[in-house]
Image (cartoon, rainbow, N blue to C red):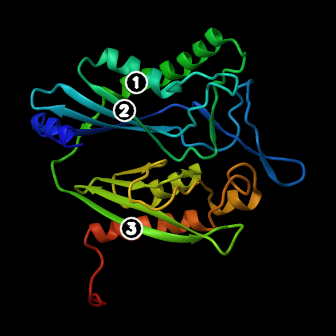
Amino acid sequence: MFKAIQEASQSLFPAKLNIGRGSIQLGYNRLLLRDDGRARALFDNLERVPHGPVDPEFVLLRVDDAEGRTRALLVHYAAHAVVLGPTNCKYSADYPGVMQRKAEQELPGAQVMFVQGGAGDINPLFMARSGKEDDDFRVVDKMGEHLATEVLRANKRVQPVPADSIQVKSELLTFADRWDKSRSLDVGIATVLIGKQIAIAAVPGEAMHKLQTTWKAQADVPHPLFYGYTFSNGGTWAGYIPDLRTAAYGGYGADASTRIEIGAGERIMQRHLINLYGLQGMWRDTPGRP
């Protein structure tokens, strides 16, 4: 650890932050409403039908050095990295790895990274289920290359973010176990404010896409980002975190394979909003003017 810190300190450079965005639908909502009025997961969608609501937007954070060279590019998108199916037993970075490789080929010297969003109910439209290794990896390549193409296009339109402070508010939230009320879950979250323009809600679990779109709609900044699968402040892994509607209709991650109490998703997002307004200096110790 100390060696890594030393190497990092020796690699410091004046940096400029840029932000960009684009849109491409590479996922579908796997929780489909069935004839009995309940939702259940459709894990394999070989016909590539774009079922249900998704968030197709991706957001880029790009770091340039003083000479204008791209040193890092962070790609934020929401879709499970499960193009490869259960018949594949090899280690793989799936479609994000292909996206990273192609983007780095076009951006020499840059480190391209991927951050998952609210993908708890979103599967990839491209699915490799032939059981033939070469054929399946070609499907992975196709989805990753589609995303990389749009990322590189959006990368040409990024806009600079004014240099300013970075503030962080972290806390542990306690929730009951949905099925065993004698147990509880401590869930660590972190809210990040970069200057006045960028706010990041970091959630340690597989949040449903509705929580991501809620944050983006309600966070009062030009660029609200939702980082799921992000273990940032201790506690336990939250697992699947459904929004209220998803929890009510059920299915995988909604009332199966989830253990966090009903309404936890909305409470987590409310705390992020409270923290964001706090970081913006909006909460006062005394009543305001009428």
Instruction: Please say if the residues under marks 2 and 1 sit with CB atoms less than 8 Å apart.
Output: yes
Counting from the top left corner in percent of width and height, residue 185 is at 55, 66
Q: Is residue 165 left or right of residue 237?
A: left
For the residues labelled 2 and 1, the Cα–Cα distance comes to 7 Å
* Circle 3 Cα neighbour tier, 10 Å, few/some/many (<14 / 14–19 / ≥20): some
Q: How many marks?
A: 3
Q: Which residue is mark 2?
A: 113
* Circle 1 Cα neighbour tier, 10 Å, few/some/many (<14 / 14–19 / ≥20): many
**Vertical placement of 36 versus 278: above or below?**
above
Which SS class for mark 3?
A: strand
Q: Residue at x 71, y 21 (%)?
A: 129
| Kind of residue indicated by mark 3 | Glu
Q: Residue at x 23, y 35 (%)?
A: 63
Which SS class for mark 2?
A: strand
Q: Which residue is mark 3?
A: 171
Counting from the top left corner in percent of width and height, residue 60 is at 35, 36
Q: Is residue 281 left or right of residue 266?
A: left
